[in-house]
Image (cartoon, rainbow, N blue to C red):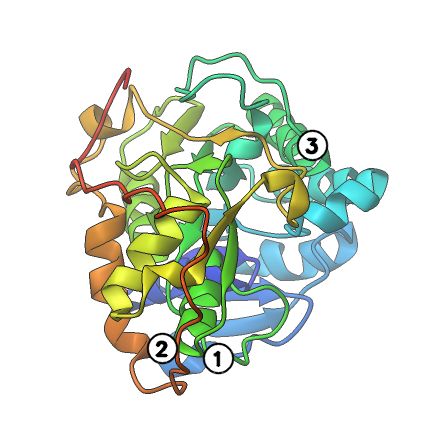
């Protein structure tokens, strides 16, 4: 057998599996728990897998002999990782070790994170010094090093904050866009950090670029970055989401990051690339305005809009950023 094995059936893993299956690839999605959407519905197959168990990995990978493997495994809840740092690092390291040893001839793409940087720089390119901001960043960095040191053809694709449509009953944490959209459409205030900067990228663009990385001729640089073209605070981004949904942006309440569940995130979680645009033949990724407009229709009619609260006395919120197209290299 051959094809692509995607380990991790969460929001990003499912998005990547869908993209690969849609173009006709033989795709196996593997995870501990059964995915919310049956992979058979979009042309993939699913296998139960505890990827930290070497024997379980062997039972799947040895007969499967995948041409490529995409690692999108957890734990990915930054707050949980901060409370359980040793366990988070153990899991990420174990999966990387198992896959590197059992798929020696496959191209392995690890979907990594902007949390491997401490956030002191406004943007981080591939050459920036790595200083993890938190336990999640340290766990991902450990997995990066294992793969890049032991696998013949491995790439760490660090992605910025990923967003897209999810149903309101998807469970656990919805991605920031979806969570904001449902709250705003219910007329509920959204408390969003005014001091946490990101370069958001849609799950569709992450899947599209991941597919291009899998297809690219070797050798590739060991590390690639993927971020959206807009550097915005979460508060600015939430206002752009409100605009796209046609709801009052007064519902967005800018607050300090320290008062939210994003307290352990780096101040600047922003990625830029000096390599990706020249290496891969892919179209520019969407900025937040275009991305929000494309997604808005998926949320239409899902909830009833309540009357907005009165504007706070603190003054008008800042304007959200506008799309500026693909940005490569230094900002």
Q: Secondary structure at mark 2?
A: helix
| Quarter of the view holding residue 101 | top right
Asked if 180 appears above or below 36 in the picture, the reply is above
Residue at the disc numbered 3:
134
Q: Nearer the viewer, residue 40 or 291?
A: 291
Spatial distance from mark 2 to mark 1, Cα to Cα? 9 Å
- Residue 43: percent from left, percent from top: 36, 76
Residue at the disc numbered 1:
37
Question: At 43% from the left edge and 47% from the top edge, which residue is drawn?
Answer: 235
**Disc number for residue 91:** none
Question: At 55% from the left edge and 64% from the top edge, which residue is drawn?
Answer: 9
Looking at the image, tell me whether mark 3 or mark 2 is earlier in sequence order.
2
Asked if 47 appears above or below 284 in the picture, the reply is below
Q: Nearer the viewer, residue 303 or 310?
A: 310
Question: Do labels 2 and 1 touch, CB within 8 Å?
Answer: yes
Question: Do labels 3 and 1 touch, CB within 8 Å?
Answer: no
């Amino acid at each position: 057998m051959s094809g692509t094995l995607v380990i991790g059936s969460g929001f990003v893993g499912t998005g990547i599996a869908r993209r690969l299956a849609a173009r006709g690839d033989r795709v196996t999605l593997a995870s501990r728990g059964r995915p919310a959407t049956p992979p058979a519905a979009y042309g993939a197959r699913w296998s139960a897998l505890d990827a930290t168990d070497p024997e379980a990995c062997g039972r799947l990978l040895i007969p499967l002999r995948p041409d490529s493997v995409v690692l999108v495994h957890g734990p990915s809840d930054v707050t949980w990782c901060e409370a359980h740092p040793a366990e988070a690092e153990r899991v990420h390291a174990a999966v990387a070790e198992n896959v590197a040893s059992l798929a020696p001839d496959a191209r392995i793409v690890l979907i990594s994170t902007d949390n491997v940087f401490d956030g002191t720089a406004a943007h981080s390119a591939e050459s920036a010094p790595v200083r993890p901001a938190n336990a999640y960043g340290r766990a991902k960095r450990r997995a990066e090093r294992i793969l890049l040191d032991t696998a013949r053809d491995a790439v760490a694709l660090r992605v910025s904050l990923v967003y897209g449509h999810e149903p309101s009953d998807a469970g656990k944490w919805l991605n920031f866009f979806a969570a904001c959209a449902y709250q705003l459409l219910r007329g509920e205030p959204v408390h969003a950090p005014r001091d946490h900067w990101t370069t958001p990228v849609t799950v569709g663009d992450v899947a599209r670029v991941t597919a291009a990385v899998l297809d690219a001729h070797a050798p590739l640089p060991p590390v690639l970055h993927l971020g959206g073209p807009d550097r915005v605070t979460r508060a600015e981004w939430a206002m752009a989401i409100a605009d796209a949904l046609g709801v009052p942006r007064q519902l967005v309440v800018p607050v300090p990051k320290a008062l939210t569940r994003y307290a352990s995130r780096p101040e600047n979680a922003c990625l830029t690339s000096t390599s990706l645009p020249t290496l891969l033949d892919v179209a520019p990724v969407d900025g937040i305005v275009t991305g929000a407009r494309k997604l808005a229709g998926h949320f239409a009619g899902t909830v009833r809009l309540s009357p907005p609260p009165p504007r706070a006395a603190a003054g008008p919120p800042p304007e959200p950023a506008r799309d500026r197209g693909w940005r490569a290299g230094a900002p």
